[in-house]
Amino acid sequence: MRKIKDLRAVELKGDYISVINQLKLPHQLEYLDLKTLEDVEKAIKDMVVRGAPLIGIVAAYGFAIGIKQYPDKPEYVYEKLKNTRPTAVNLFWALNRMMDKYNRLKDKDKETLIAELFKEAERIEIGDYHANKSIGGYGEVLIPKKANILTHCNTGALATGGWGTALGVIRSAFENEKDITVFVDETRPYLQGSRLTAWELDYEGIPHYIITDSSAGFLISKKMIDVIIIGADRITLNGDVANKIGSYTLSVLAKYHNIPFYVAAPTSTFDLNTLKGEDIPIEQRSENEVKYCGGCKVAPENSKVINYSFDIVPASNITAIITEKGIIQNPDKEKILKFFNKRSLL
Ligand code: MRU
């Protein structure tokens, strides 16, 4: 078995957290202390921390930090954090869990309440790490002994409580001595692939190439890609997946060229209260993220920009969803209800 380094994007330091400032990567590994509700709110909004599971984890710590500051204003703390980013459902999942904990303990003394809230946030973080290790275990079985794998955006330790989802499957395959090469994209608008995923792969010594998003089709047509694997920001009841813009295009290419298209995500990324992908709110971000690249202006001042941060992969384009509890092949509403052992909610 190969050795894998254990990178962590967030660390609890008593009654505040320290996070990797992802805006500074790959140039600098800088840690930022988040000590107030406002610090946490800004870090999520500005994408100092990002990635669906990590947004949930940091928001959970933010809730504990916020209650310490505003012990009698749980709704205020909840709303502030809830309004940071709209698409990743892990944010709302984590905040609802923290609010439940608060409601169960609100009659305790303040010290006990706050200590228990920090413990709950830590359980969310550690739970996510273990979920990812399990996703890695289920997912790596699907990766051939020798494979060229295309992955989109960043789904690694930097996006989660550790190990990663799609990148966790890649880590597990590498750890198990598989002969893999990773093709990394999302090179625009935010360069999450080239800045963050390539940095993580380089850190681990996993062979990889950065490709521009627009090269994916050509490489697939030349049979240079065997498997595509991505993460998810939200998975609806019918199996549609919201993920970083560009994911839909890759899923269409995979279907056309008949190569497997996998989604790796913890069960906290499922939103069973939303029926289908088109009902998911899709974040639109600032036009400057497109007009500027690495601090340089790369577009005319007067041009307008459309900058959706996510798109929707229809369930019919997905070969399987890999979770910590097992794999859902050819996902649809019936299979997802059966997987969660539920009757129809909608
Ligand atoms: O805008 P981001 O960087 O928060 O978007 C991240 C993604 O789209 C990831 O692919 C997704 O959150 C899965 S992370 C395990």
Image (tube, rainbow, N blue to C red):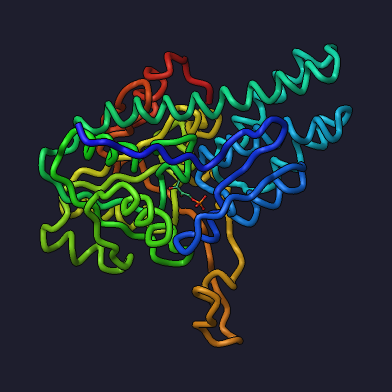
Q: Residue 256 location in percent, x, y?
A: 19, 54
Give the quadrant of residue 12: top right
Relative to 98, residue 92 above or below: below
Above or below, 112 against 14 in this view is above
| Residue plotted at (20% across, 43% down) | 260
302 sits to left or right of 230: right
Give the residue at x 18% y 37%: 143
The residue lying toward the viewer, choosing from 124 and 8, is 8
**Residue 123 x, y percent position in the rendering:** 57, 22
Which quadrant of the view contains residue 304?
Answer: bottom right
Relative to 156, say whether 120 is above or below.
above
Decide which of 185, 203 is in the foreground and name it. Answer: 203
Indicate the quadrant containing the N terminus: top left, top right, bottom left or bottom right: top left
Outermost residue toward the right?
A: 72
Q: In this view, does 285 lie to the left or right of 257?
A: right
* Residue 41 x %, y %: 71, 47
304 relative to 105 in the view: left or right: left
- Location of residue 71 in the rendering, given as x and y in whole percent from the top left corner: 86, 28
